Image (cartoon, grey):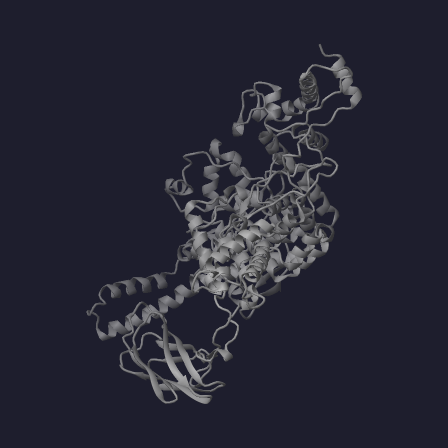
Amino acid sequence: MTPVTLYSCRVKDPAPAGFTARWAGFAAMLVLGSAAMADNARFRKDIHPILTEYCYDCHGDGMEKGNVAFDGFASDEALLADRTLWLQVLKNLQTRTMPPEKKDRPSDRQIARLESWIKSEVFQIDPKNPDPGRVTVRRLNRAEYRNTVRDLMGVDYDTKEEFPPDDSGYGFDNISDVLTLPPMLLEKYLDAAKDIVNRVVPLVERVAPETIIGKFEGEGTWGTSLSYYAKNAVTNRFNMAHAGRYKVVLDLRANEKFVDNVFDLNKCRLTFRLDGEVLLTKEFNREGNLPFLFDFDRECAAGGHEMSFEVEPLTSEKQVRALKLRINQVAFTGPLDDRKTWVRPKGFERFFTKDAPTDAEGRRAYARELLGNFATKAFRRPIDPATAEKLASLAQTVYDAPGKTFEAGMAHAMVAVLASPRFLFREEAPAPALVDGRFPFVDEHSLASRLSYFLWSTMPDDELRRLADEGKLRATLPAQIQRMLKDKRSYAFVQNFAGQWLLARDIETVPIDSGVVVRRDESRDSEFEAKQKRLSALRKRQNGDLTKEEQAEFDTLLAEVRQVVRRKRPELNGDLRRAMRAETEKYFEHVMRDDRPLVELIDSDYTYLNERLAQHYGMSNVLGDDFRLVKLPPDSPRGGVLTMGTILATTSNPTRTSPVKRGVFILDHLLGAPPPPPPPNIPPLENTESANKGRELTLRETLEIHRAKPLCSSCHNRMDPLGLALENFNAIGMWRDTERQQPIEPAGRLISGESFQDIRGLKKILATTHAEDFRRCLTEKLLTYALGRGLEYYDVATVDSIVDRIAKEDGKFSALMLGIIESAPFQRTRTDRSTVSLPRPEPAQLRAQLKSSP
């Protein structure tokens, strides 16, 4: 139930205890009851006639399409209380999807009246004091945890490998409601905290220096690779500054390249010498790319030294792989016994500022200072003295133990910080006081976290923390937003927002059978089919039964068939998938950083390509692996996100395109008008195909049969024209003119009435006639991502104001970004002190209502 503000009145004469409170409650009920009657009267007078005239054909008088009947409620009050229904009505009005094209439609004035009434009377929105909603405490997702640990500890912790996938809500994986903390994940967080601290926090003040040698003279270069198949050697001459005992660690890897799953039986012997002395002799065979570490203790004099590696082949088997030994480096640590030469361990300055004091009180104060600063960064807000004291006590229990160092105690306390809910969850707090009775701002440290996790997917940096400490962040927001978007960390926003909104992250795992996809569209090649048939027959007899001539024929046919398959059936391999993702991310990044109009995301005369992706798209004017902005020819169907391989592949089935999925994507991700979920037990399209006893059907023909069913027509009339406009692109994003030897017909007509001939025409319609729908949809998606919660009815006013701002500022990306960050939901919060209040009646009106009551 929505909380409301109750109004009390002042009684002149003393009254019995409790009387004033009871009278105030009674008066409030009268006010609210009177307001409800007024609402009902306005509904009956202004709104009900519009619904009766334009909506009851489908949603009244016994009809309830979509399970909606406006006259199916017990009372007007019950109808007006269903805000979920009215939110859907509002969306249908804004996107002009209801009433359908063939039905009579209300005038623009009537639509405006309906929209205004829904917002003011049903939702009771106060545009000057919008409800910001409440975001529950939010756990860091995998990307945020990884980035935060990177910036706090200097560790790139592989969260995809160590943690289970995050759940998603509303299309994103940073939604507070779904980021739960099951016991198994809590255990993983504790293990991760220990692992991270062990990797980088030094446990001593000084260590023996380390010298790394990785460059060798001879047949190899840096990171030298030595072949199994020929005798070869490399050397290195180096100097030692100090004499003494050293630990020598050899780091190498046995590399191999797979060829047709055939084993390479060759072996070799590696000999490692230092100053002529053999330190290692070892035989290697096919080692499966395994790493090897060997360590030795050696006395070394000051001055020049020489080490060498020699590989000698031990067999002469047929070479079917590329076996080799890769020498990564040799590390010399020492002198181990001369502490005068020792240095600070790696990373010491990141966590410590000096040697620990020797007296107990000084050590305790130093621990309190260091851990207080560390926890302040980790918890993303200043900690109280009691917390710093507890952490110092935790560290002391370790460093006071026999054989333990001060640094070991600090590491122990840091593990506790990284395992704390205050690190794992984003804690927010309101500003100290309400302003003019409105919803309170979040405090500046909460705002710093909202900004940094929105734009960087990581913790606030030093500048954001400093401004929050000084209470100046909110006053300098535009400059900070500009700074943050220029920072390389803002690429996380591209990856995590655009990567989910535009499905770019899904391209790396979406299952697509490229061969089946291409075979669906290619014309028959009788000569190639004959070669395949002959090759298959020879393969069945290959186990020793082929003559010399037949074996030669088999080898020739195999090479020819493979060449044709590679040419005709491109594989959606890892390189191509990564290229597709890069195109989408770099394109979105360009619109963001260059502050381009948002509609360029739908239609433009450019895209981002490298040679591999350009060839896949049938373009020959792009060379090299680097991505660059490429201007498209005037008649190109490319340009905009709809024609990118990421979306075309992720909205397809494994073996064919899916006009339905593509249509749903446009409706949901670009127009903000998703269709309802399909009814249960709907047969797949393939059943419609198999029912046809003649030629194979195109997808357009199959959908026409499917759409003829009354149960399916209403949704498919919205989805299919959008998806069929993309049928010239197959399931891996390549252009085609035919499907199953039939010409593709991409022309269509939208449910809102606009006609188009192909994808070029559809993109123009979406970028012009439906530009506001797109901006509203993108605003809703980005606001959802920024807040970490789904949008509710009370967010309508915020979305409206941002969309209006975008229109006034030429549709630029900056207007969207600033609109989100400066909005009430981003800046403010709902607390127990703030209320959602009904419009306050004037005092004279209140007195009149009280006077007329019994």
- The image position of residue 573, as x and y in percent, is 44, 61
Residue 704 horizontal side relative to residue 28, left or right? left
Residue 549 image position (x, y, % from top left)? 25, 74
Q: How many marks?
A: 0
Residue toward you, 448 or 42: 448
Q: Is residue 387 above or below residue 791?
A: below
Does residue 642 appear anywhere in the picture?
A: no
- Farthest residue, direction top: 854
838 is higher (above) or lower (below) than 250? above
Q: Nearer the viewer, residue 506 or 355?
A: 355
Q: Please state the horizontal and vertical placement of residue 274, each as a whole percent of the image.
A: 38, 86
Residue 14 vertical placement versus 69 (above, below): above
Q: Residue sitting at 64 percent across and 59 percent down?
A: 462
Residue 625 at x, y percent in the picture = 53, 69
Is residue 708 placed above or below 585 in the rendered structure? above
Name the residue nearer the viewer: 743 or 686. Answer: 686
Q: Nearer the viewer, residue 603 or 749?
A: 603
- Quarter of the image for the N terminus: give it: top right
